[in-house]
Amino acid sequence: MYWLRKAWGELAHEVFVLPSRTLVLVWVLALLGLPLVYDDAYVLRILTMTCLFAMFAASWDMLAGYTGQVNFGHALFFGAGAYTSSLMSQKLGISPWLTIWAGAALAALVGWVVGYLCLRLRGSYLSLATLAFPLIVLGLLFAFPEFSGGELGISGVGRLVLTPTQNYYLAALAMLAVVFALWLVADSKFGVVLHAIRDDEVAARASGINTPRYKLAVFALSAAAAGLAGALFAHYIRVAGPSTLEVALSFQVVIWGIFGGVATIYGPVAAVFLLYPLTEWLGSFKAFGELRLLIFAVIVLLVLLFMPRGLAPWVRDKVETQCPRCKQRNSAWKNLCRLCGAPLKTQVPRAQRLVGHQ
Amino acid sequence: MLQDILVTGLVNSGVYALLAVGFSLIFGVARIVNIAHTAFYMLAAYCFYALLVKGGLGFALAGVLAVAAVTLLSVLCYRLVIEPVREHEAAVLIATIALALIFQELMLFSFGGHYLGIPSTLEGVVRLFGVSIPYQRLLILVVAAAMLGAVWFLLYRTRLGLAIRATANDLEVANLMGMNVHRVAMATVAISVALAAIAGVVVAPVFVVDPFMWLSPLVTMLAIVVLGGLGSMKGSLIGALIIGYVEAITVFALPAGAYLKGAVALLIMVAVLLARPEGLFGVAFEEER
């Protein structure tokens, strides 16, 4: 009884005070409870894919949003995870439950190597150079088809679990764990350092931060998350093909990330949860089937014209305000800050407004 | 084989140079990484096809109309889509990606996904040093050279060119000196897309025309521009020659070369970046923070 009351207290004082936190709680509960009330195989399939891509998009945001290393070749890590895990489970006969970790580990190694090669590059140079890596790997895969399966990829990859509901729970739990872990890392002192590196690398170095080490760590961490997503994806659709390395996937994750709002982690996740089911749903209509990518691009363009900073920051600024004194967030309809009691909307007298701020 | 490499490399370099110089120009002046650049090249090829085969116009007229239409469209896109989000670099980036996707899907919808063949503008071959070159490839080379000359003249011998170079050098100071930087940026967009459109029109009879033809030159063009140094005309030109020849050598000399040509070109780019992070002719932008 005591624990129940304590939990309720935590919930009421930490979660329900902010609309964004309430929204996240509702989303998590809905995600976990959905198969209990509605277990249509098609819907579960779409949501499983959505979860895997959400993990992928969140890992991109860690690298591009927080650290400012805008990666145009993020599909490399996804593909590295997918190919490693499939090849190991198929050629060596190891259980997929072990190989997905190997996939994530190799992706982390690949991420470290890419990060090492790109250490001296900045801004647009880095973006355009990273675009090259998945294409180099793709060229090698096509040149040695007997090892990689060439254009068809590796098919008949072993499954992790059998039923759609189990697959859904596996993807959803993995996604929640990875996204929450990334969010914790981004919210820690480590994350603050990453913000510093993005905003001014020279100043960060002058403050005694070993920026190359941090950048390599983020490359490896983000690649590991993307690789895990890729490995789970390959075992779910049972094919590891060249499409996991293509430019289209790299661009897709950039669109998700920026559409949702960079440097938030939850923004790209929200973007995937909106955009991926939307495109699938549009594709299910006969008339729209051919036009779905067109509609997708137009929607992205229009939303961007109105919310250039992305969807999640725009929504957050609508429902919450920042306390001018203690910088904590409050719901937008409150008058006093919930923590320090300072007035949130400063009432400027009419006469003073006419004269101007002193 | 040596002659084949020489000729193919030169022709490919010409096309790549047209694309890369335009991209570099737009990046230098407006700091826009225009992913849709080669999508305009694809649009020009389609436009040329529609006017020539469906519309029954002559080669010259169809070509000029296609270039004009695509250039007009690019200015329109810039005003309506790019300019409102100019301050947000990330938004500009995905706006251009979205534009490219929109063009691709529109062409897919209206012309279908199959390859379209366009009759050669000029028939016949000329024999040079024992290798036969079709007139069409010679035309590509001549047009590319003429256009690069024209761009050089525009940039270094006219007032507009002076304004463009000044804006690329320092946008704020150029603005303070009384140049209308918005109009300069718009003119640059028009010039750079016109170059891409011209490239699209001249290569349409040689390469296949399909809605995905923008992807592979996009990657090569980005490799060239990064290799030569972002925003540098000379770098783009020399980068185009290097990548064009590397691709030709890979295709002719290596087994499975057609698959590896992109990979080898990109490897060269990565190697150059490791030695010189700002590209061959780029300025080290230490002060740009």
Image (cartoon, coloured by chain):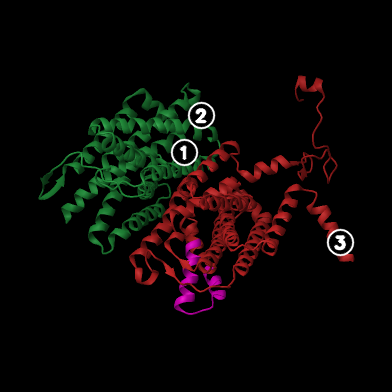
Q: Which residue is mark 1?
A: B32
The mark closer to the camera, 2 or 3, is 3
**Image-quadrant location for residue B68:** top left
Type of amino acid under label 1: Ile
| Chain identifier of the red chain | A
Q: Residues within 10 Å of mark 1 (few under 14, many from 20)?
A: many
Where does the C terminus of chain A fall, quadrant-wise?
top right
Secondary element at tag 2 = helix
Residue A332 visible from this viewpoint: yes
Q: Are marks 2 and 3 on the same chain?
A: no
Residue shown at 15% from the left, 46% from the top: B133
The mark closer to the camera, 3 or 1, is 3
Secondary element at tag 3 = helix
Q: Which residue is mark 2?
A: B172
Type of amino acid under label 3: Lys
Q: Which residue is mark 3?
A: A6
Residue B191 visible from this viewpoint: no
| Chain identifier of the green chain | B
**Image-quadrant location for residue B258:** bottom left
Q: State which region is magenta.
A: A78-103
Chain to which the residue tagged by mark 3 belongs: A
Q: CA distance from mark 3 to mark 1?
A: 53 Å
Secondary element at tag 1 = loop
Q: Residue furthest bottom?
A: A93
Chain to which the residue tagged by mark 1 belongs: B
Dominant secondary structure, magenta: helix
Chain to which the residue tagged by mark 2 belongs: B
Marks 2 and 3 in Cβ contact (< 8 Å): no
